[in-house]
Amino acid sequence: MSDAALAVSYATVTGMAQPHKGDRDLITARVPHPVFLALKEAAAQRGIPMSQYVGDAMSLHFGRPDLVRELGQEVLPRSA
């Protein structure tokens, strides 16, 4: 399904159009359950979707702050 079709599909489901966030690729990852819960909580605390949080965190991790959309330039906490 194309990006445009996905956007239309999402808008149909939510009733809202979503802004285009640039050229993106979809990945699927299996993470340990405690990590999933930490990601879910961190995204919820910031009021952003978990997938956006993960994408922004990965962008920062790989030295691409120019690709961050929601997290801004904040420093992400490290877990022990």
Image (tube, rainbow, N blue to C red):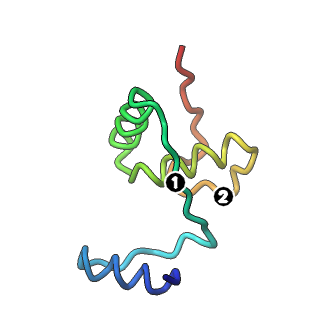
Q: Amino acid at mark 1?
A: Thr
**Residue 45: percent from left, percent from top:** 34, 38
**Image location of residue 66, percent across then percent down:** 70, 56
Separation (CA) of disc 1 from disc 2: 19 Å
What crowding class fits label 2: few (fewer than 14 Cα within 10 Å), some (14-19), or many (20 or more)?
some
Q: Identify which residue is drawn at 48% across, 47% down.
A: 53
Q: Secondary structure at mark 2?
A: helix
> At 52% from the left edge and 47% from the top edge, which residue is drawn?
29
Whether pointer 1 and pointer 2 mark residues with C-beta atoms closer than 8 Å, the reply is no
With respect to residue 58, does 37 lie above or below? above
Q: Residue furthest front?
A: 30
In this rendering, position of residue 13 left or right of residue 40 = left
Residue that carries the numbered disc 2 in the rendered image:
67
Label 1, secondary structure: give it. loop
Residue 28 numbered tag: 1
* Residue found at x 66% / y 58%: 67
Task: Please state, as top left, top right, bottom left or bottom right, where the C terminus lies in the image.
Answer: top right
Q: Give the mark, 1 or 2, whose residue is nearer the N terminus.
A: 1
Q: Residue at x 36, y 39 (%)?
A: 40
Q: Residue furthest top?
A: 80
Q: Is residue 60 placed above or below 41 in the rendered structure? A: below
In the displayed structure image, the side of residue 9 where residue 60 appears, left or right: right
Picture coordinates of residue 57, whole percent (x, y): 58, 43
Spot occupied by residue 79 in the image (x, y as percentages of width and height): 53, 20
